[in-house]
Amino acid sequence: MSISLMKIIDEYAGRIIMYFISVFKNINGNNIINTDISHKNILFIKFWGIGSIILTTAAVRKVKATYPDAKIFFLTLNTNMEICKEIKCADEIISINISNPFNFITDFYKKTFDLRKNNFDIIYDFEFYTYFSAIIVSLMKCKKSFGFDNLKNNRKIVFTQTIPFEDKIHTKDNFIHLVNTDESVLSGNYVNDELPSLSAITSNANGGMKITINVNASKLAYERRLPGEYYVKMTDFIAEHFSCKVILTGSDDEAEYVENIYRQVKEKNHVDNLCGKTSVKELISVIKSSACLITNDSGPLHIASALNIPVIAFFGPESPQRYGPLSCKSLVFYKHLECSPCMSVSNSKTVNCIYDSPKCMEQFDITDVIRKVNKFIRELKVPEKIKETKIQNLKRNQL
């Protein structure tokens, strides 16, 4: 199913279903088991966004540290299974098939029925304001449940406790605040929550300096992409001035777009186009072996943060305050236009551009961008690699 169709279903069908659930709850009370909490089974729910799923890991670690003997379940969409396996987010990962409406309905029924058998001690709904996740919580048998509430819909009634999503802090911190709503987690064992985490993956570095440029913005919002000519100019500049390998990445559905960028690049001998050719694990390996990642707002940005790889990021429709890189070194470009950000958790992460095309991504001065990118890369702790490549190139030219 397309993302736009799923948003429509959630907004309209979800709202109607949630209304009837709220009426039922008011009459019969919440579906809460009135027994002592043993913390044997804990469920996390997060459906949308690879980047957001990565950002949940710090909060999940806090819960795991507080309840080390609990079995952790993570419910997501089938499209997110790869990243969930890589971040080892749970003891058991359950996914719902969204390939088409029929598969979605049948798989939703089956997975919900299976999950009900677990009698969860705690459920954390990491979705921001979707009805779909709240409906699932309402169908579960649980003792405590926590979720976000925007005070505009009936989600609140299915949870034992809710908090608002705070726009002015990073999304990672919103997830941590949600689990901290449970006083046991708030006062539990300390864990380092500065960065999300990924499992140890051996990088495929073959020597020499590599810089990855992620052109991907995902179907959620293609408006987050920089204009193609910006990528072409940055790629040529980096390949020429740093004598390094440049890797272009992106998803399957953006292969044609990235191939068009690759065709315009002059320094093709220094550029590899891997768009649509890597699994999630292979993409993680590529980023891990890179000196830095250049990207717009999308999942690979958060993969780099999880690996603590330096990031150069471009934002427009979304705010870097909410989704900016968490790496030790980063450079963020953001125009701060009056209309930005126009996508948020309150509008289901939908771009509401008032122009024919997103000016927030088209008004960067590419000359200024390249100057700052050049300075950023040269200040990374890779001067010897740059020096070595230049010496090797000089020797080759002399032969």
Image (cartoon, grey):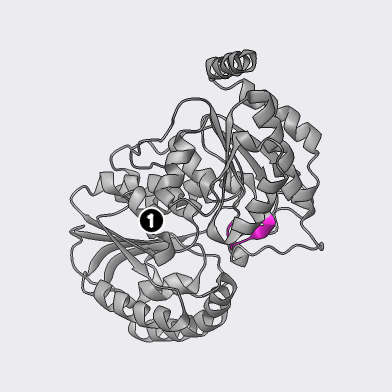
- Whether residue 38 is visible: yes
Residue 53 in which image quadrant: bottom left
Q: Quadrant of the C terminus?
A: top right
Residue 105 forms part of the magenta stretch: no
Which residue is farthest front?
Answer: 399
Q: Is residue 229 above or below residue 210?
A: below
Foreground pick, 213 / 67: 213
Mark 1 lies on residue? 82
Q: Where is residue 101 in the image (x, y as percent from the top left)?
A: 46, 82
- Predominant SS along the magenta part: loop
Q: Which residue is drawn at 74% across and 34% down?
A: 369
Q: Is residue 339 above or below residue 284?
A: below
- Whether residue 30 is visible: no
Q: Position of residue 37 (x, y in %)?
A: 20, 61
Region of the chain picked out in magenta, as a range = 218-223
Residue 221 forms part of the magenta stretch: yes
